[in-house]
Image: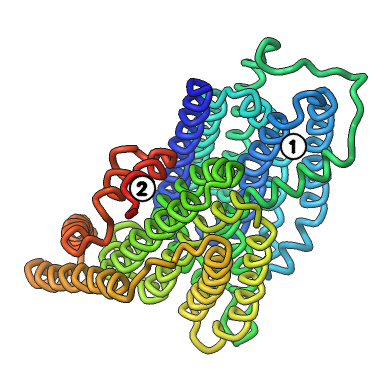
């Protein structure tokens, strides 16, 4: 029994590690892409990107997790479940492809740019390939083979990123338009999904996974449960994608309605989109934690270990707040040199700094969504994110007119903050995880952020006075040294003020992310 549980945890950690690498790759590649294509080219890519992000979240995260859980719980009916899942995934893929491909001209016009039809149609082809990967990943996970799923994730992202950059480099060099380059780059996502599916199909083993039985029945109840669970389990991955989708439809249109020239508005959208890789990098730790925490929380709930549920909730939220806050404040402090280092100039730095305020709230959403799913409140998490979308839409319509790019950034901060607060309230109601939190803990946390910010800003002032002029090399030196200095200062102060107890530090680092060990260590050291 212990060996089985250990293998399950090893598999969960393997998937978490793979997801961490995937998220890093997904954030980093957009920097060289923007450098090659410029802000306008980046705008084109980012307008179609949310469709990929939403599809990938549901098909590559939600669907496999939902299917694997159902396979584990429906062992006597797996023939029917396998047939239902195959038909469900492929039928949805075909319907999604046809719908998006045919509606691409209308979507492009709603976005305010008819030339986006081609990039949107290219990304629609993705829906023909992702069902195979989604089904096979879920099946392998359901039968305990996490290794193939992890490798397929890495393969998919490696092929995708390589395809995007190589195709873009060729098209830019040959003088193709920004729209043609964007469409070509998006085809890299299709190649990645195809490569992942072929890889998984090659390793299909009858001894590990069941053969397809044509005589099995398609059960609508299974299909409905798969769809519902897929959406719930992909919620955390959908947050940023949905925020980007709202911006894709409203950012340019609101600017144009306010009197700006269409080209200038699109260029500003490309500048604003520089913030997306920064948000992904800033929240990658919380996103990985969310993936690891769901199965352990579900396990604790099943065993009715309420004290351990409270401990796991408290530590998970604390990690997301402490490190999400540090990433948020740190990026704000170094935004100008960082913007110059990554994107060639400092344009839009103030808006990007405002946008980075959302890192802490998005980190909380990632973690709390995972926790809520684990304790059976996935529906509430979904409703909180729907509320965030409503706030984002209203915020864009009102704030962009008055504050420009900063208004769009502020609407994201407001939307994600509301979702985070709603989820924390529900977590508190369900687990009482804040019962031992004192005001002094909050003061120590805020003081730590203040000391880090002061040290980093002082160093930036000194460094800027040492260097003559603002070059990209100078910006790189300032950004890297400031990041290292800020990290050292912050860790020193939070250790000094004991933001984390010794048991919590051991759990965070010694267990290398093993949430099970987190709970056990905290349980042993809990005051009697």
Secondary structure under tag 1 reads helix
Left or right position of 195 against 74: left
Residue 245's x, y, as percent? Answer: 63, 63
385 is higher (above) or lower (below) than 69 = below
- Asked if one can make out residue 403 in the rendered structure from this viewpoint, the answer is yes
How far apart are labels 1 and 2 at the CA level?
A: 46 Å
Residue 449's x, y, as percent? Answer: 26, 69
Q: How is the image coloured?
A: rainbow
385 is higher (above) or lower (below) than 396 = above
- The residue at which mark 1 appears reads as 128
In this view, the mark in front (1 or 2): 2
Residue 306's x, y, as percent? Answer: 52, 52
- The residue at which mark 2 appears reads as 522
Q: Which residue sits at x=57%, y=51%?
A: 182
Q: Which residue sits at x=52%, y=42%?
A: 296
Q: Which quadrant of the structure image shows residue 401? A: bottom right
Left or right position of 280 against 70: left
Left or right position of 463 against 247: left
- How packed is label 2: few (under 14 Cα within 10 Å), some, or many (20 or more)? many
Using the image as rendered, state which of residue 428 and residue 401 is in the foreground: 428
Q: Which residue sits at x=28%, y=69%?
A: 445
């Amino acid at each position: 029994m212990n060996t089985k549980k250990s293998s399950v945890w090893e598999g969960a950690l393997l998937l978490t590690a793979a997801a961490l690498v995937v998220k890093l790759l997904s954030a980093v590649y957009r920097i060289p892409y923007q450098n090659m294509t410029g802000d306008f080219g980046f705008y084109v890519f980012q307008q179609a990107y949310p469709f990929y992000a939403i599809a990938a979240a549901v098909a590559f995260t939600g669907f496999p997790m939902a299917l694997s859980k159902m396979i584990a719980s429906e062992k006597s009916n797996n023939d029917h479940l396998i047939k239902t899942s195959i038909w469900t995934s492929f039928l949805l893929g075909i319907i999604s492809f046809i719908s998006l491909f045919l509606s691409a001209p209308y979507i492009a016009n709603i976005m305010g740019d008819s030339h986006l039809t081609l990039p949107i149609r290219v990304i629609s082809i993705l829906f023909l390939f992702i069902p195979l990967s989604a089904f096979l990943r879920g099946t392998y996970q359901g039968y305990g083979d996490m290794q193939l799923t992890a490798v397929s994730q890495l393969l998919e992202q490696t092929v995708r990123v390589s395809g995007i950059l190589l195709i873009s480099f060729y098209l830019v060099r040959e003088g193709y338009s920004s729209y043609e380059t964007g469409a070509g780059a998006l085809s890299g996502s299709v190649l990645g999904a195809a490569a992942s599916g072929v890889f998984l199909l090659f390793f299909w083993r009858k001894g590990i996974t069941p053969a397809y039985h044509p005589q099995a029945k398609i059960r609508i109840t299974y299909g409905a449960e798969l769809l519902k669970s897929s959406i719930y389990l992909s919620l955390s991955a959908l947050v940023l994608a949905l925020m980007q989708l709202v911006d894709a439809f409203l950012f340019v249109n609101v600017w144009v309605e306010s009197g700006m020239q269409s080209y200038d508005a699109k260029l500003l959208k490309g500048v604003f989109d520089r913030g997306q890789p920064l948000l992904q990098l800033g929240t990658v730790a919380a996103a990985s934690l969310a993936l690891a925490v769901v199965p352990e929380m579900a396990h604790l709930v099943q065993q009715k270990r309420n004290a351990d549920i409270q401990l796991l909730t408290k530590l998970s939220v604390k990690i997301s707040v402490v490190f999400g806050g540090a990433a948020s404040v740190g990026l704000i402090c170094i935004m100008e040199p960082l913007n110059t280092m990554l994107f060639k100039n400092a344009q839009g730095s103030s808006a990007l700094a405002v946008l980075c305020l959302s890192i802490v709230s998005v980190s909380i959403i990632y973690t709390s969504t995972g926790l809520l799913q684990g304790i059976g409140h996935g529906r509430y998490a979904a409703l909180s994110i729907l509320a965030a979308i409503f706030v984002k839409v209203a915020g864009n319509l009102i704030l962009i007119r008055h504050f420009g790019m900063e208004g769009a950034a502020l609407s994201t901060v407001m939307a994600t903050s509301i979702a985070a607060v709603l989820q924390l309230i529900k977590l508190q109601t369900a687990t009482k995880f804040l019962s031992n939190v004192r005001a002094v803990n909050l003061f120590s946390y805020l003081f730590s952020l203040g000391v880090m910010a002061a040290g980093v800003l002082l160093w930036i002032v000194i460094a800027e006075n040492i260097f003559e002029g603002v070059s990209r090399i100078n910006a790189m030196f300032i950004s890297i040294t400031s990041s290292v200095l800020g990290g050292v200062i912050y860790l020193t102060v939070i250790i000094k003020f004991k933001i984390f107890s010794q048991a919590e530090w051991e759990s965070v680092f010694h267990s290398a992310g093993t949430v099970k060990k987190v709970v056990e260590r905290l349980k042993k050291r809990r005051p009697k």
